Image: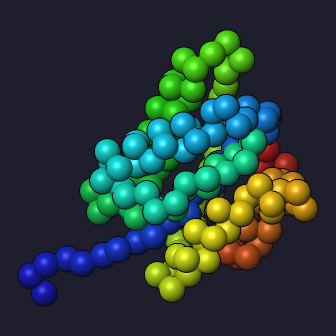
Amino acid sequence: MPQSYRKLFVHIVFCTKLRITFIDDQIEQELFSYLGGIAKNMECPPVKIGGYRNHVHILCILSQKVLLMTLVEKLKSGSSQWIKTQGAKYQYFYWQSGYAAFSVSPGSVQDVKNYIDLQKDHHKKISFQDEFIEFLKQNYMEYDERYIWD
């Protein structure tokens, strides 16, 4: 085969350090747009970006030119630097050091988009911590809860 073909959808999740609720109504849409711009500039087209108060969900197509860890590093560092310029109340903003990433089959993309769209409603019923643990379990990921949170 003379060409390589791939289209990998990835669902990335990370939260603020100590799960502090920095992502308020004033900043959230700009933050999601900023994250989308970083992903787009890295040739990882964003499909859907959202989140709620202390975490973000990013569904994008992973470029064949970019390592996942590089994408996440750029998303976190670039958005952290940007948000600190948005006012005094954001000056101590930091992301948690870790992240999670899940592969998404093309047939499940719409379900993940819907899930991201409904974050505000979803988190009236479940905390981010419980949501995150559930994601790990659903994806058969081994974890030690002592090392998930910082």
Quadrant where the image shows the N terminus: bottom left
Farthest residue, direction top? 88
Q: Nearer the viewer, residue 145 or 64?
A: 64
| Residue 132 left/right relative to 82 | right
Quarter of the picture holding the C terminus: top right
Residue positioned most to the left:
2
Can you say whether 146 is above or below 135 in the image?
A: above
Q: Please tell me in which quadrant of the rendered image residue 26 appears.
A: top right
Provide residue 133's location: percent of width, then percent of height.
80, 62
Q: In the image, is 14 to the left or to the right of 105?
A: right
Q: Is residue 142 visible?
A: no
Question: In the figure, residue 38 lies in which quadrant?
Answer: top left
| Residue at image location 49% in from the left, 43% down from the top | 33
Q: Residue furthest front?
A: 26
Q: Is residue 21 above or below residue 126?
A: above
Along the line of sight, the residue nearer the viewer: 107 or 137: 107
Frontmost residue, 30 versus 42: 30
Looking at the picture, how far across and down is residue 104, in whole percent?
53, 75
Residue 143: percent from left, percent from top: 76, 61
Report the residue at 71% width, 63% height from top.
118
Q: In x, y percent, where is residue 110?
A: 55, 77
- Seen at 40% across and 71% down, the residue is 8
Q: Residue furthest right?
A: 125
**Residue 46 in sight from this viewpoint:** yes
Considering only vertical position in the picture, is 4 above or below 29?
below
Q: How many marks?
A: 0
Write the residue at 63% across / 39% down.
28
> In the displayed structure, does residue 147 sit left or right of residue 2?
right
Colour scheme of the picture: rainbow
